[in-house]
Amino acid sequence: MPSVRPQDLVEAILEAITQSGEAGVLVSPTRDHPCRFAVSGPEGPVLLWVYAWTLTPGGRPQLANEYRIQMTSVSSPLGLNPSGPTLLIGYEPNLRMFGGFAVARHRTFAIGSPSVQIDITALRQALQDGLAFHRKSNDEIAVAIRPDQFMVYARTA
């Protein structure tokens, strides 16, 4: 599966912000990592930083349901937003769903192409439930996010 173009990722995030009942605008260049969004909603304004990549199949035959983001084009450590949330997410364009990962666990990483995984069944479950959780073998919890729940996740991640 090819990567989603940066402008399509930004559009998916902006659409998710809208579906969540809030208003957002991109305030950084489209290709920046992180992308920065000014968001306003019932809980007040927030500056949201988002590191986002396409979720793609993990490539390991023994883990057919594994999807991953590959954190390319960024350096370790990832910068954190001093005045609001910082998200590390993947976007699966066929399902139009997001996977959220604990930025604190992946802020620093080795040179190369670090990847972070989620089980695709969690994304399918979140289609029905809004949010779904996948506990990984290292006890990290990845969160599958339906677009209308994006800001719930962003404000509480």
Image (cartoon, rainbow, N blue to C red):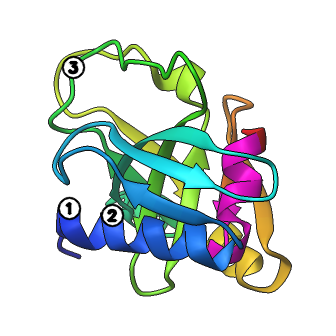
Spot occupied by residue 14 in the image (x, y as percentages of width and height): 45, 68
In the image: residue 111, left or right of residue 154: left
- The kind of residue tagged 3 is Ser
Determine which residue is flagged by label 1.
6
- The kind of residue tagged 2 is Val
Q: Which residues are magenta?
A: 144-155
Q: Is residue 15 visible?
A: yes
- The kind of residue tagged 1 is Pro
Determine which residue is flagged by label 3.
75
Describe the element under mark 2 as helix, strand or loop.
helix
Residue 121 appears in which quarter of the rendering? bottom right
In the image: residue 94, left or right of residue 138: left
Residue 116 appears in which quarter of the rendering? top left
Describe the element under mark 1 as helix, strand or loop.
helix
Determine which residue is flagged by label 2.
10
Of badges 3 and 1, the one in the foreground is 1
Query: Is 114 situated above or below 59?
Result: above
Q: Residue at x 53, y 15 (%)?
A: 82
* Mark 3 or 1, nearer chain start: 1
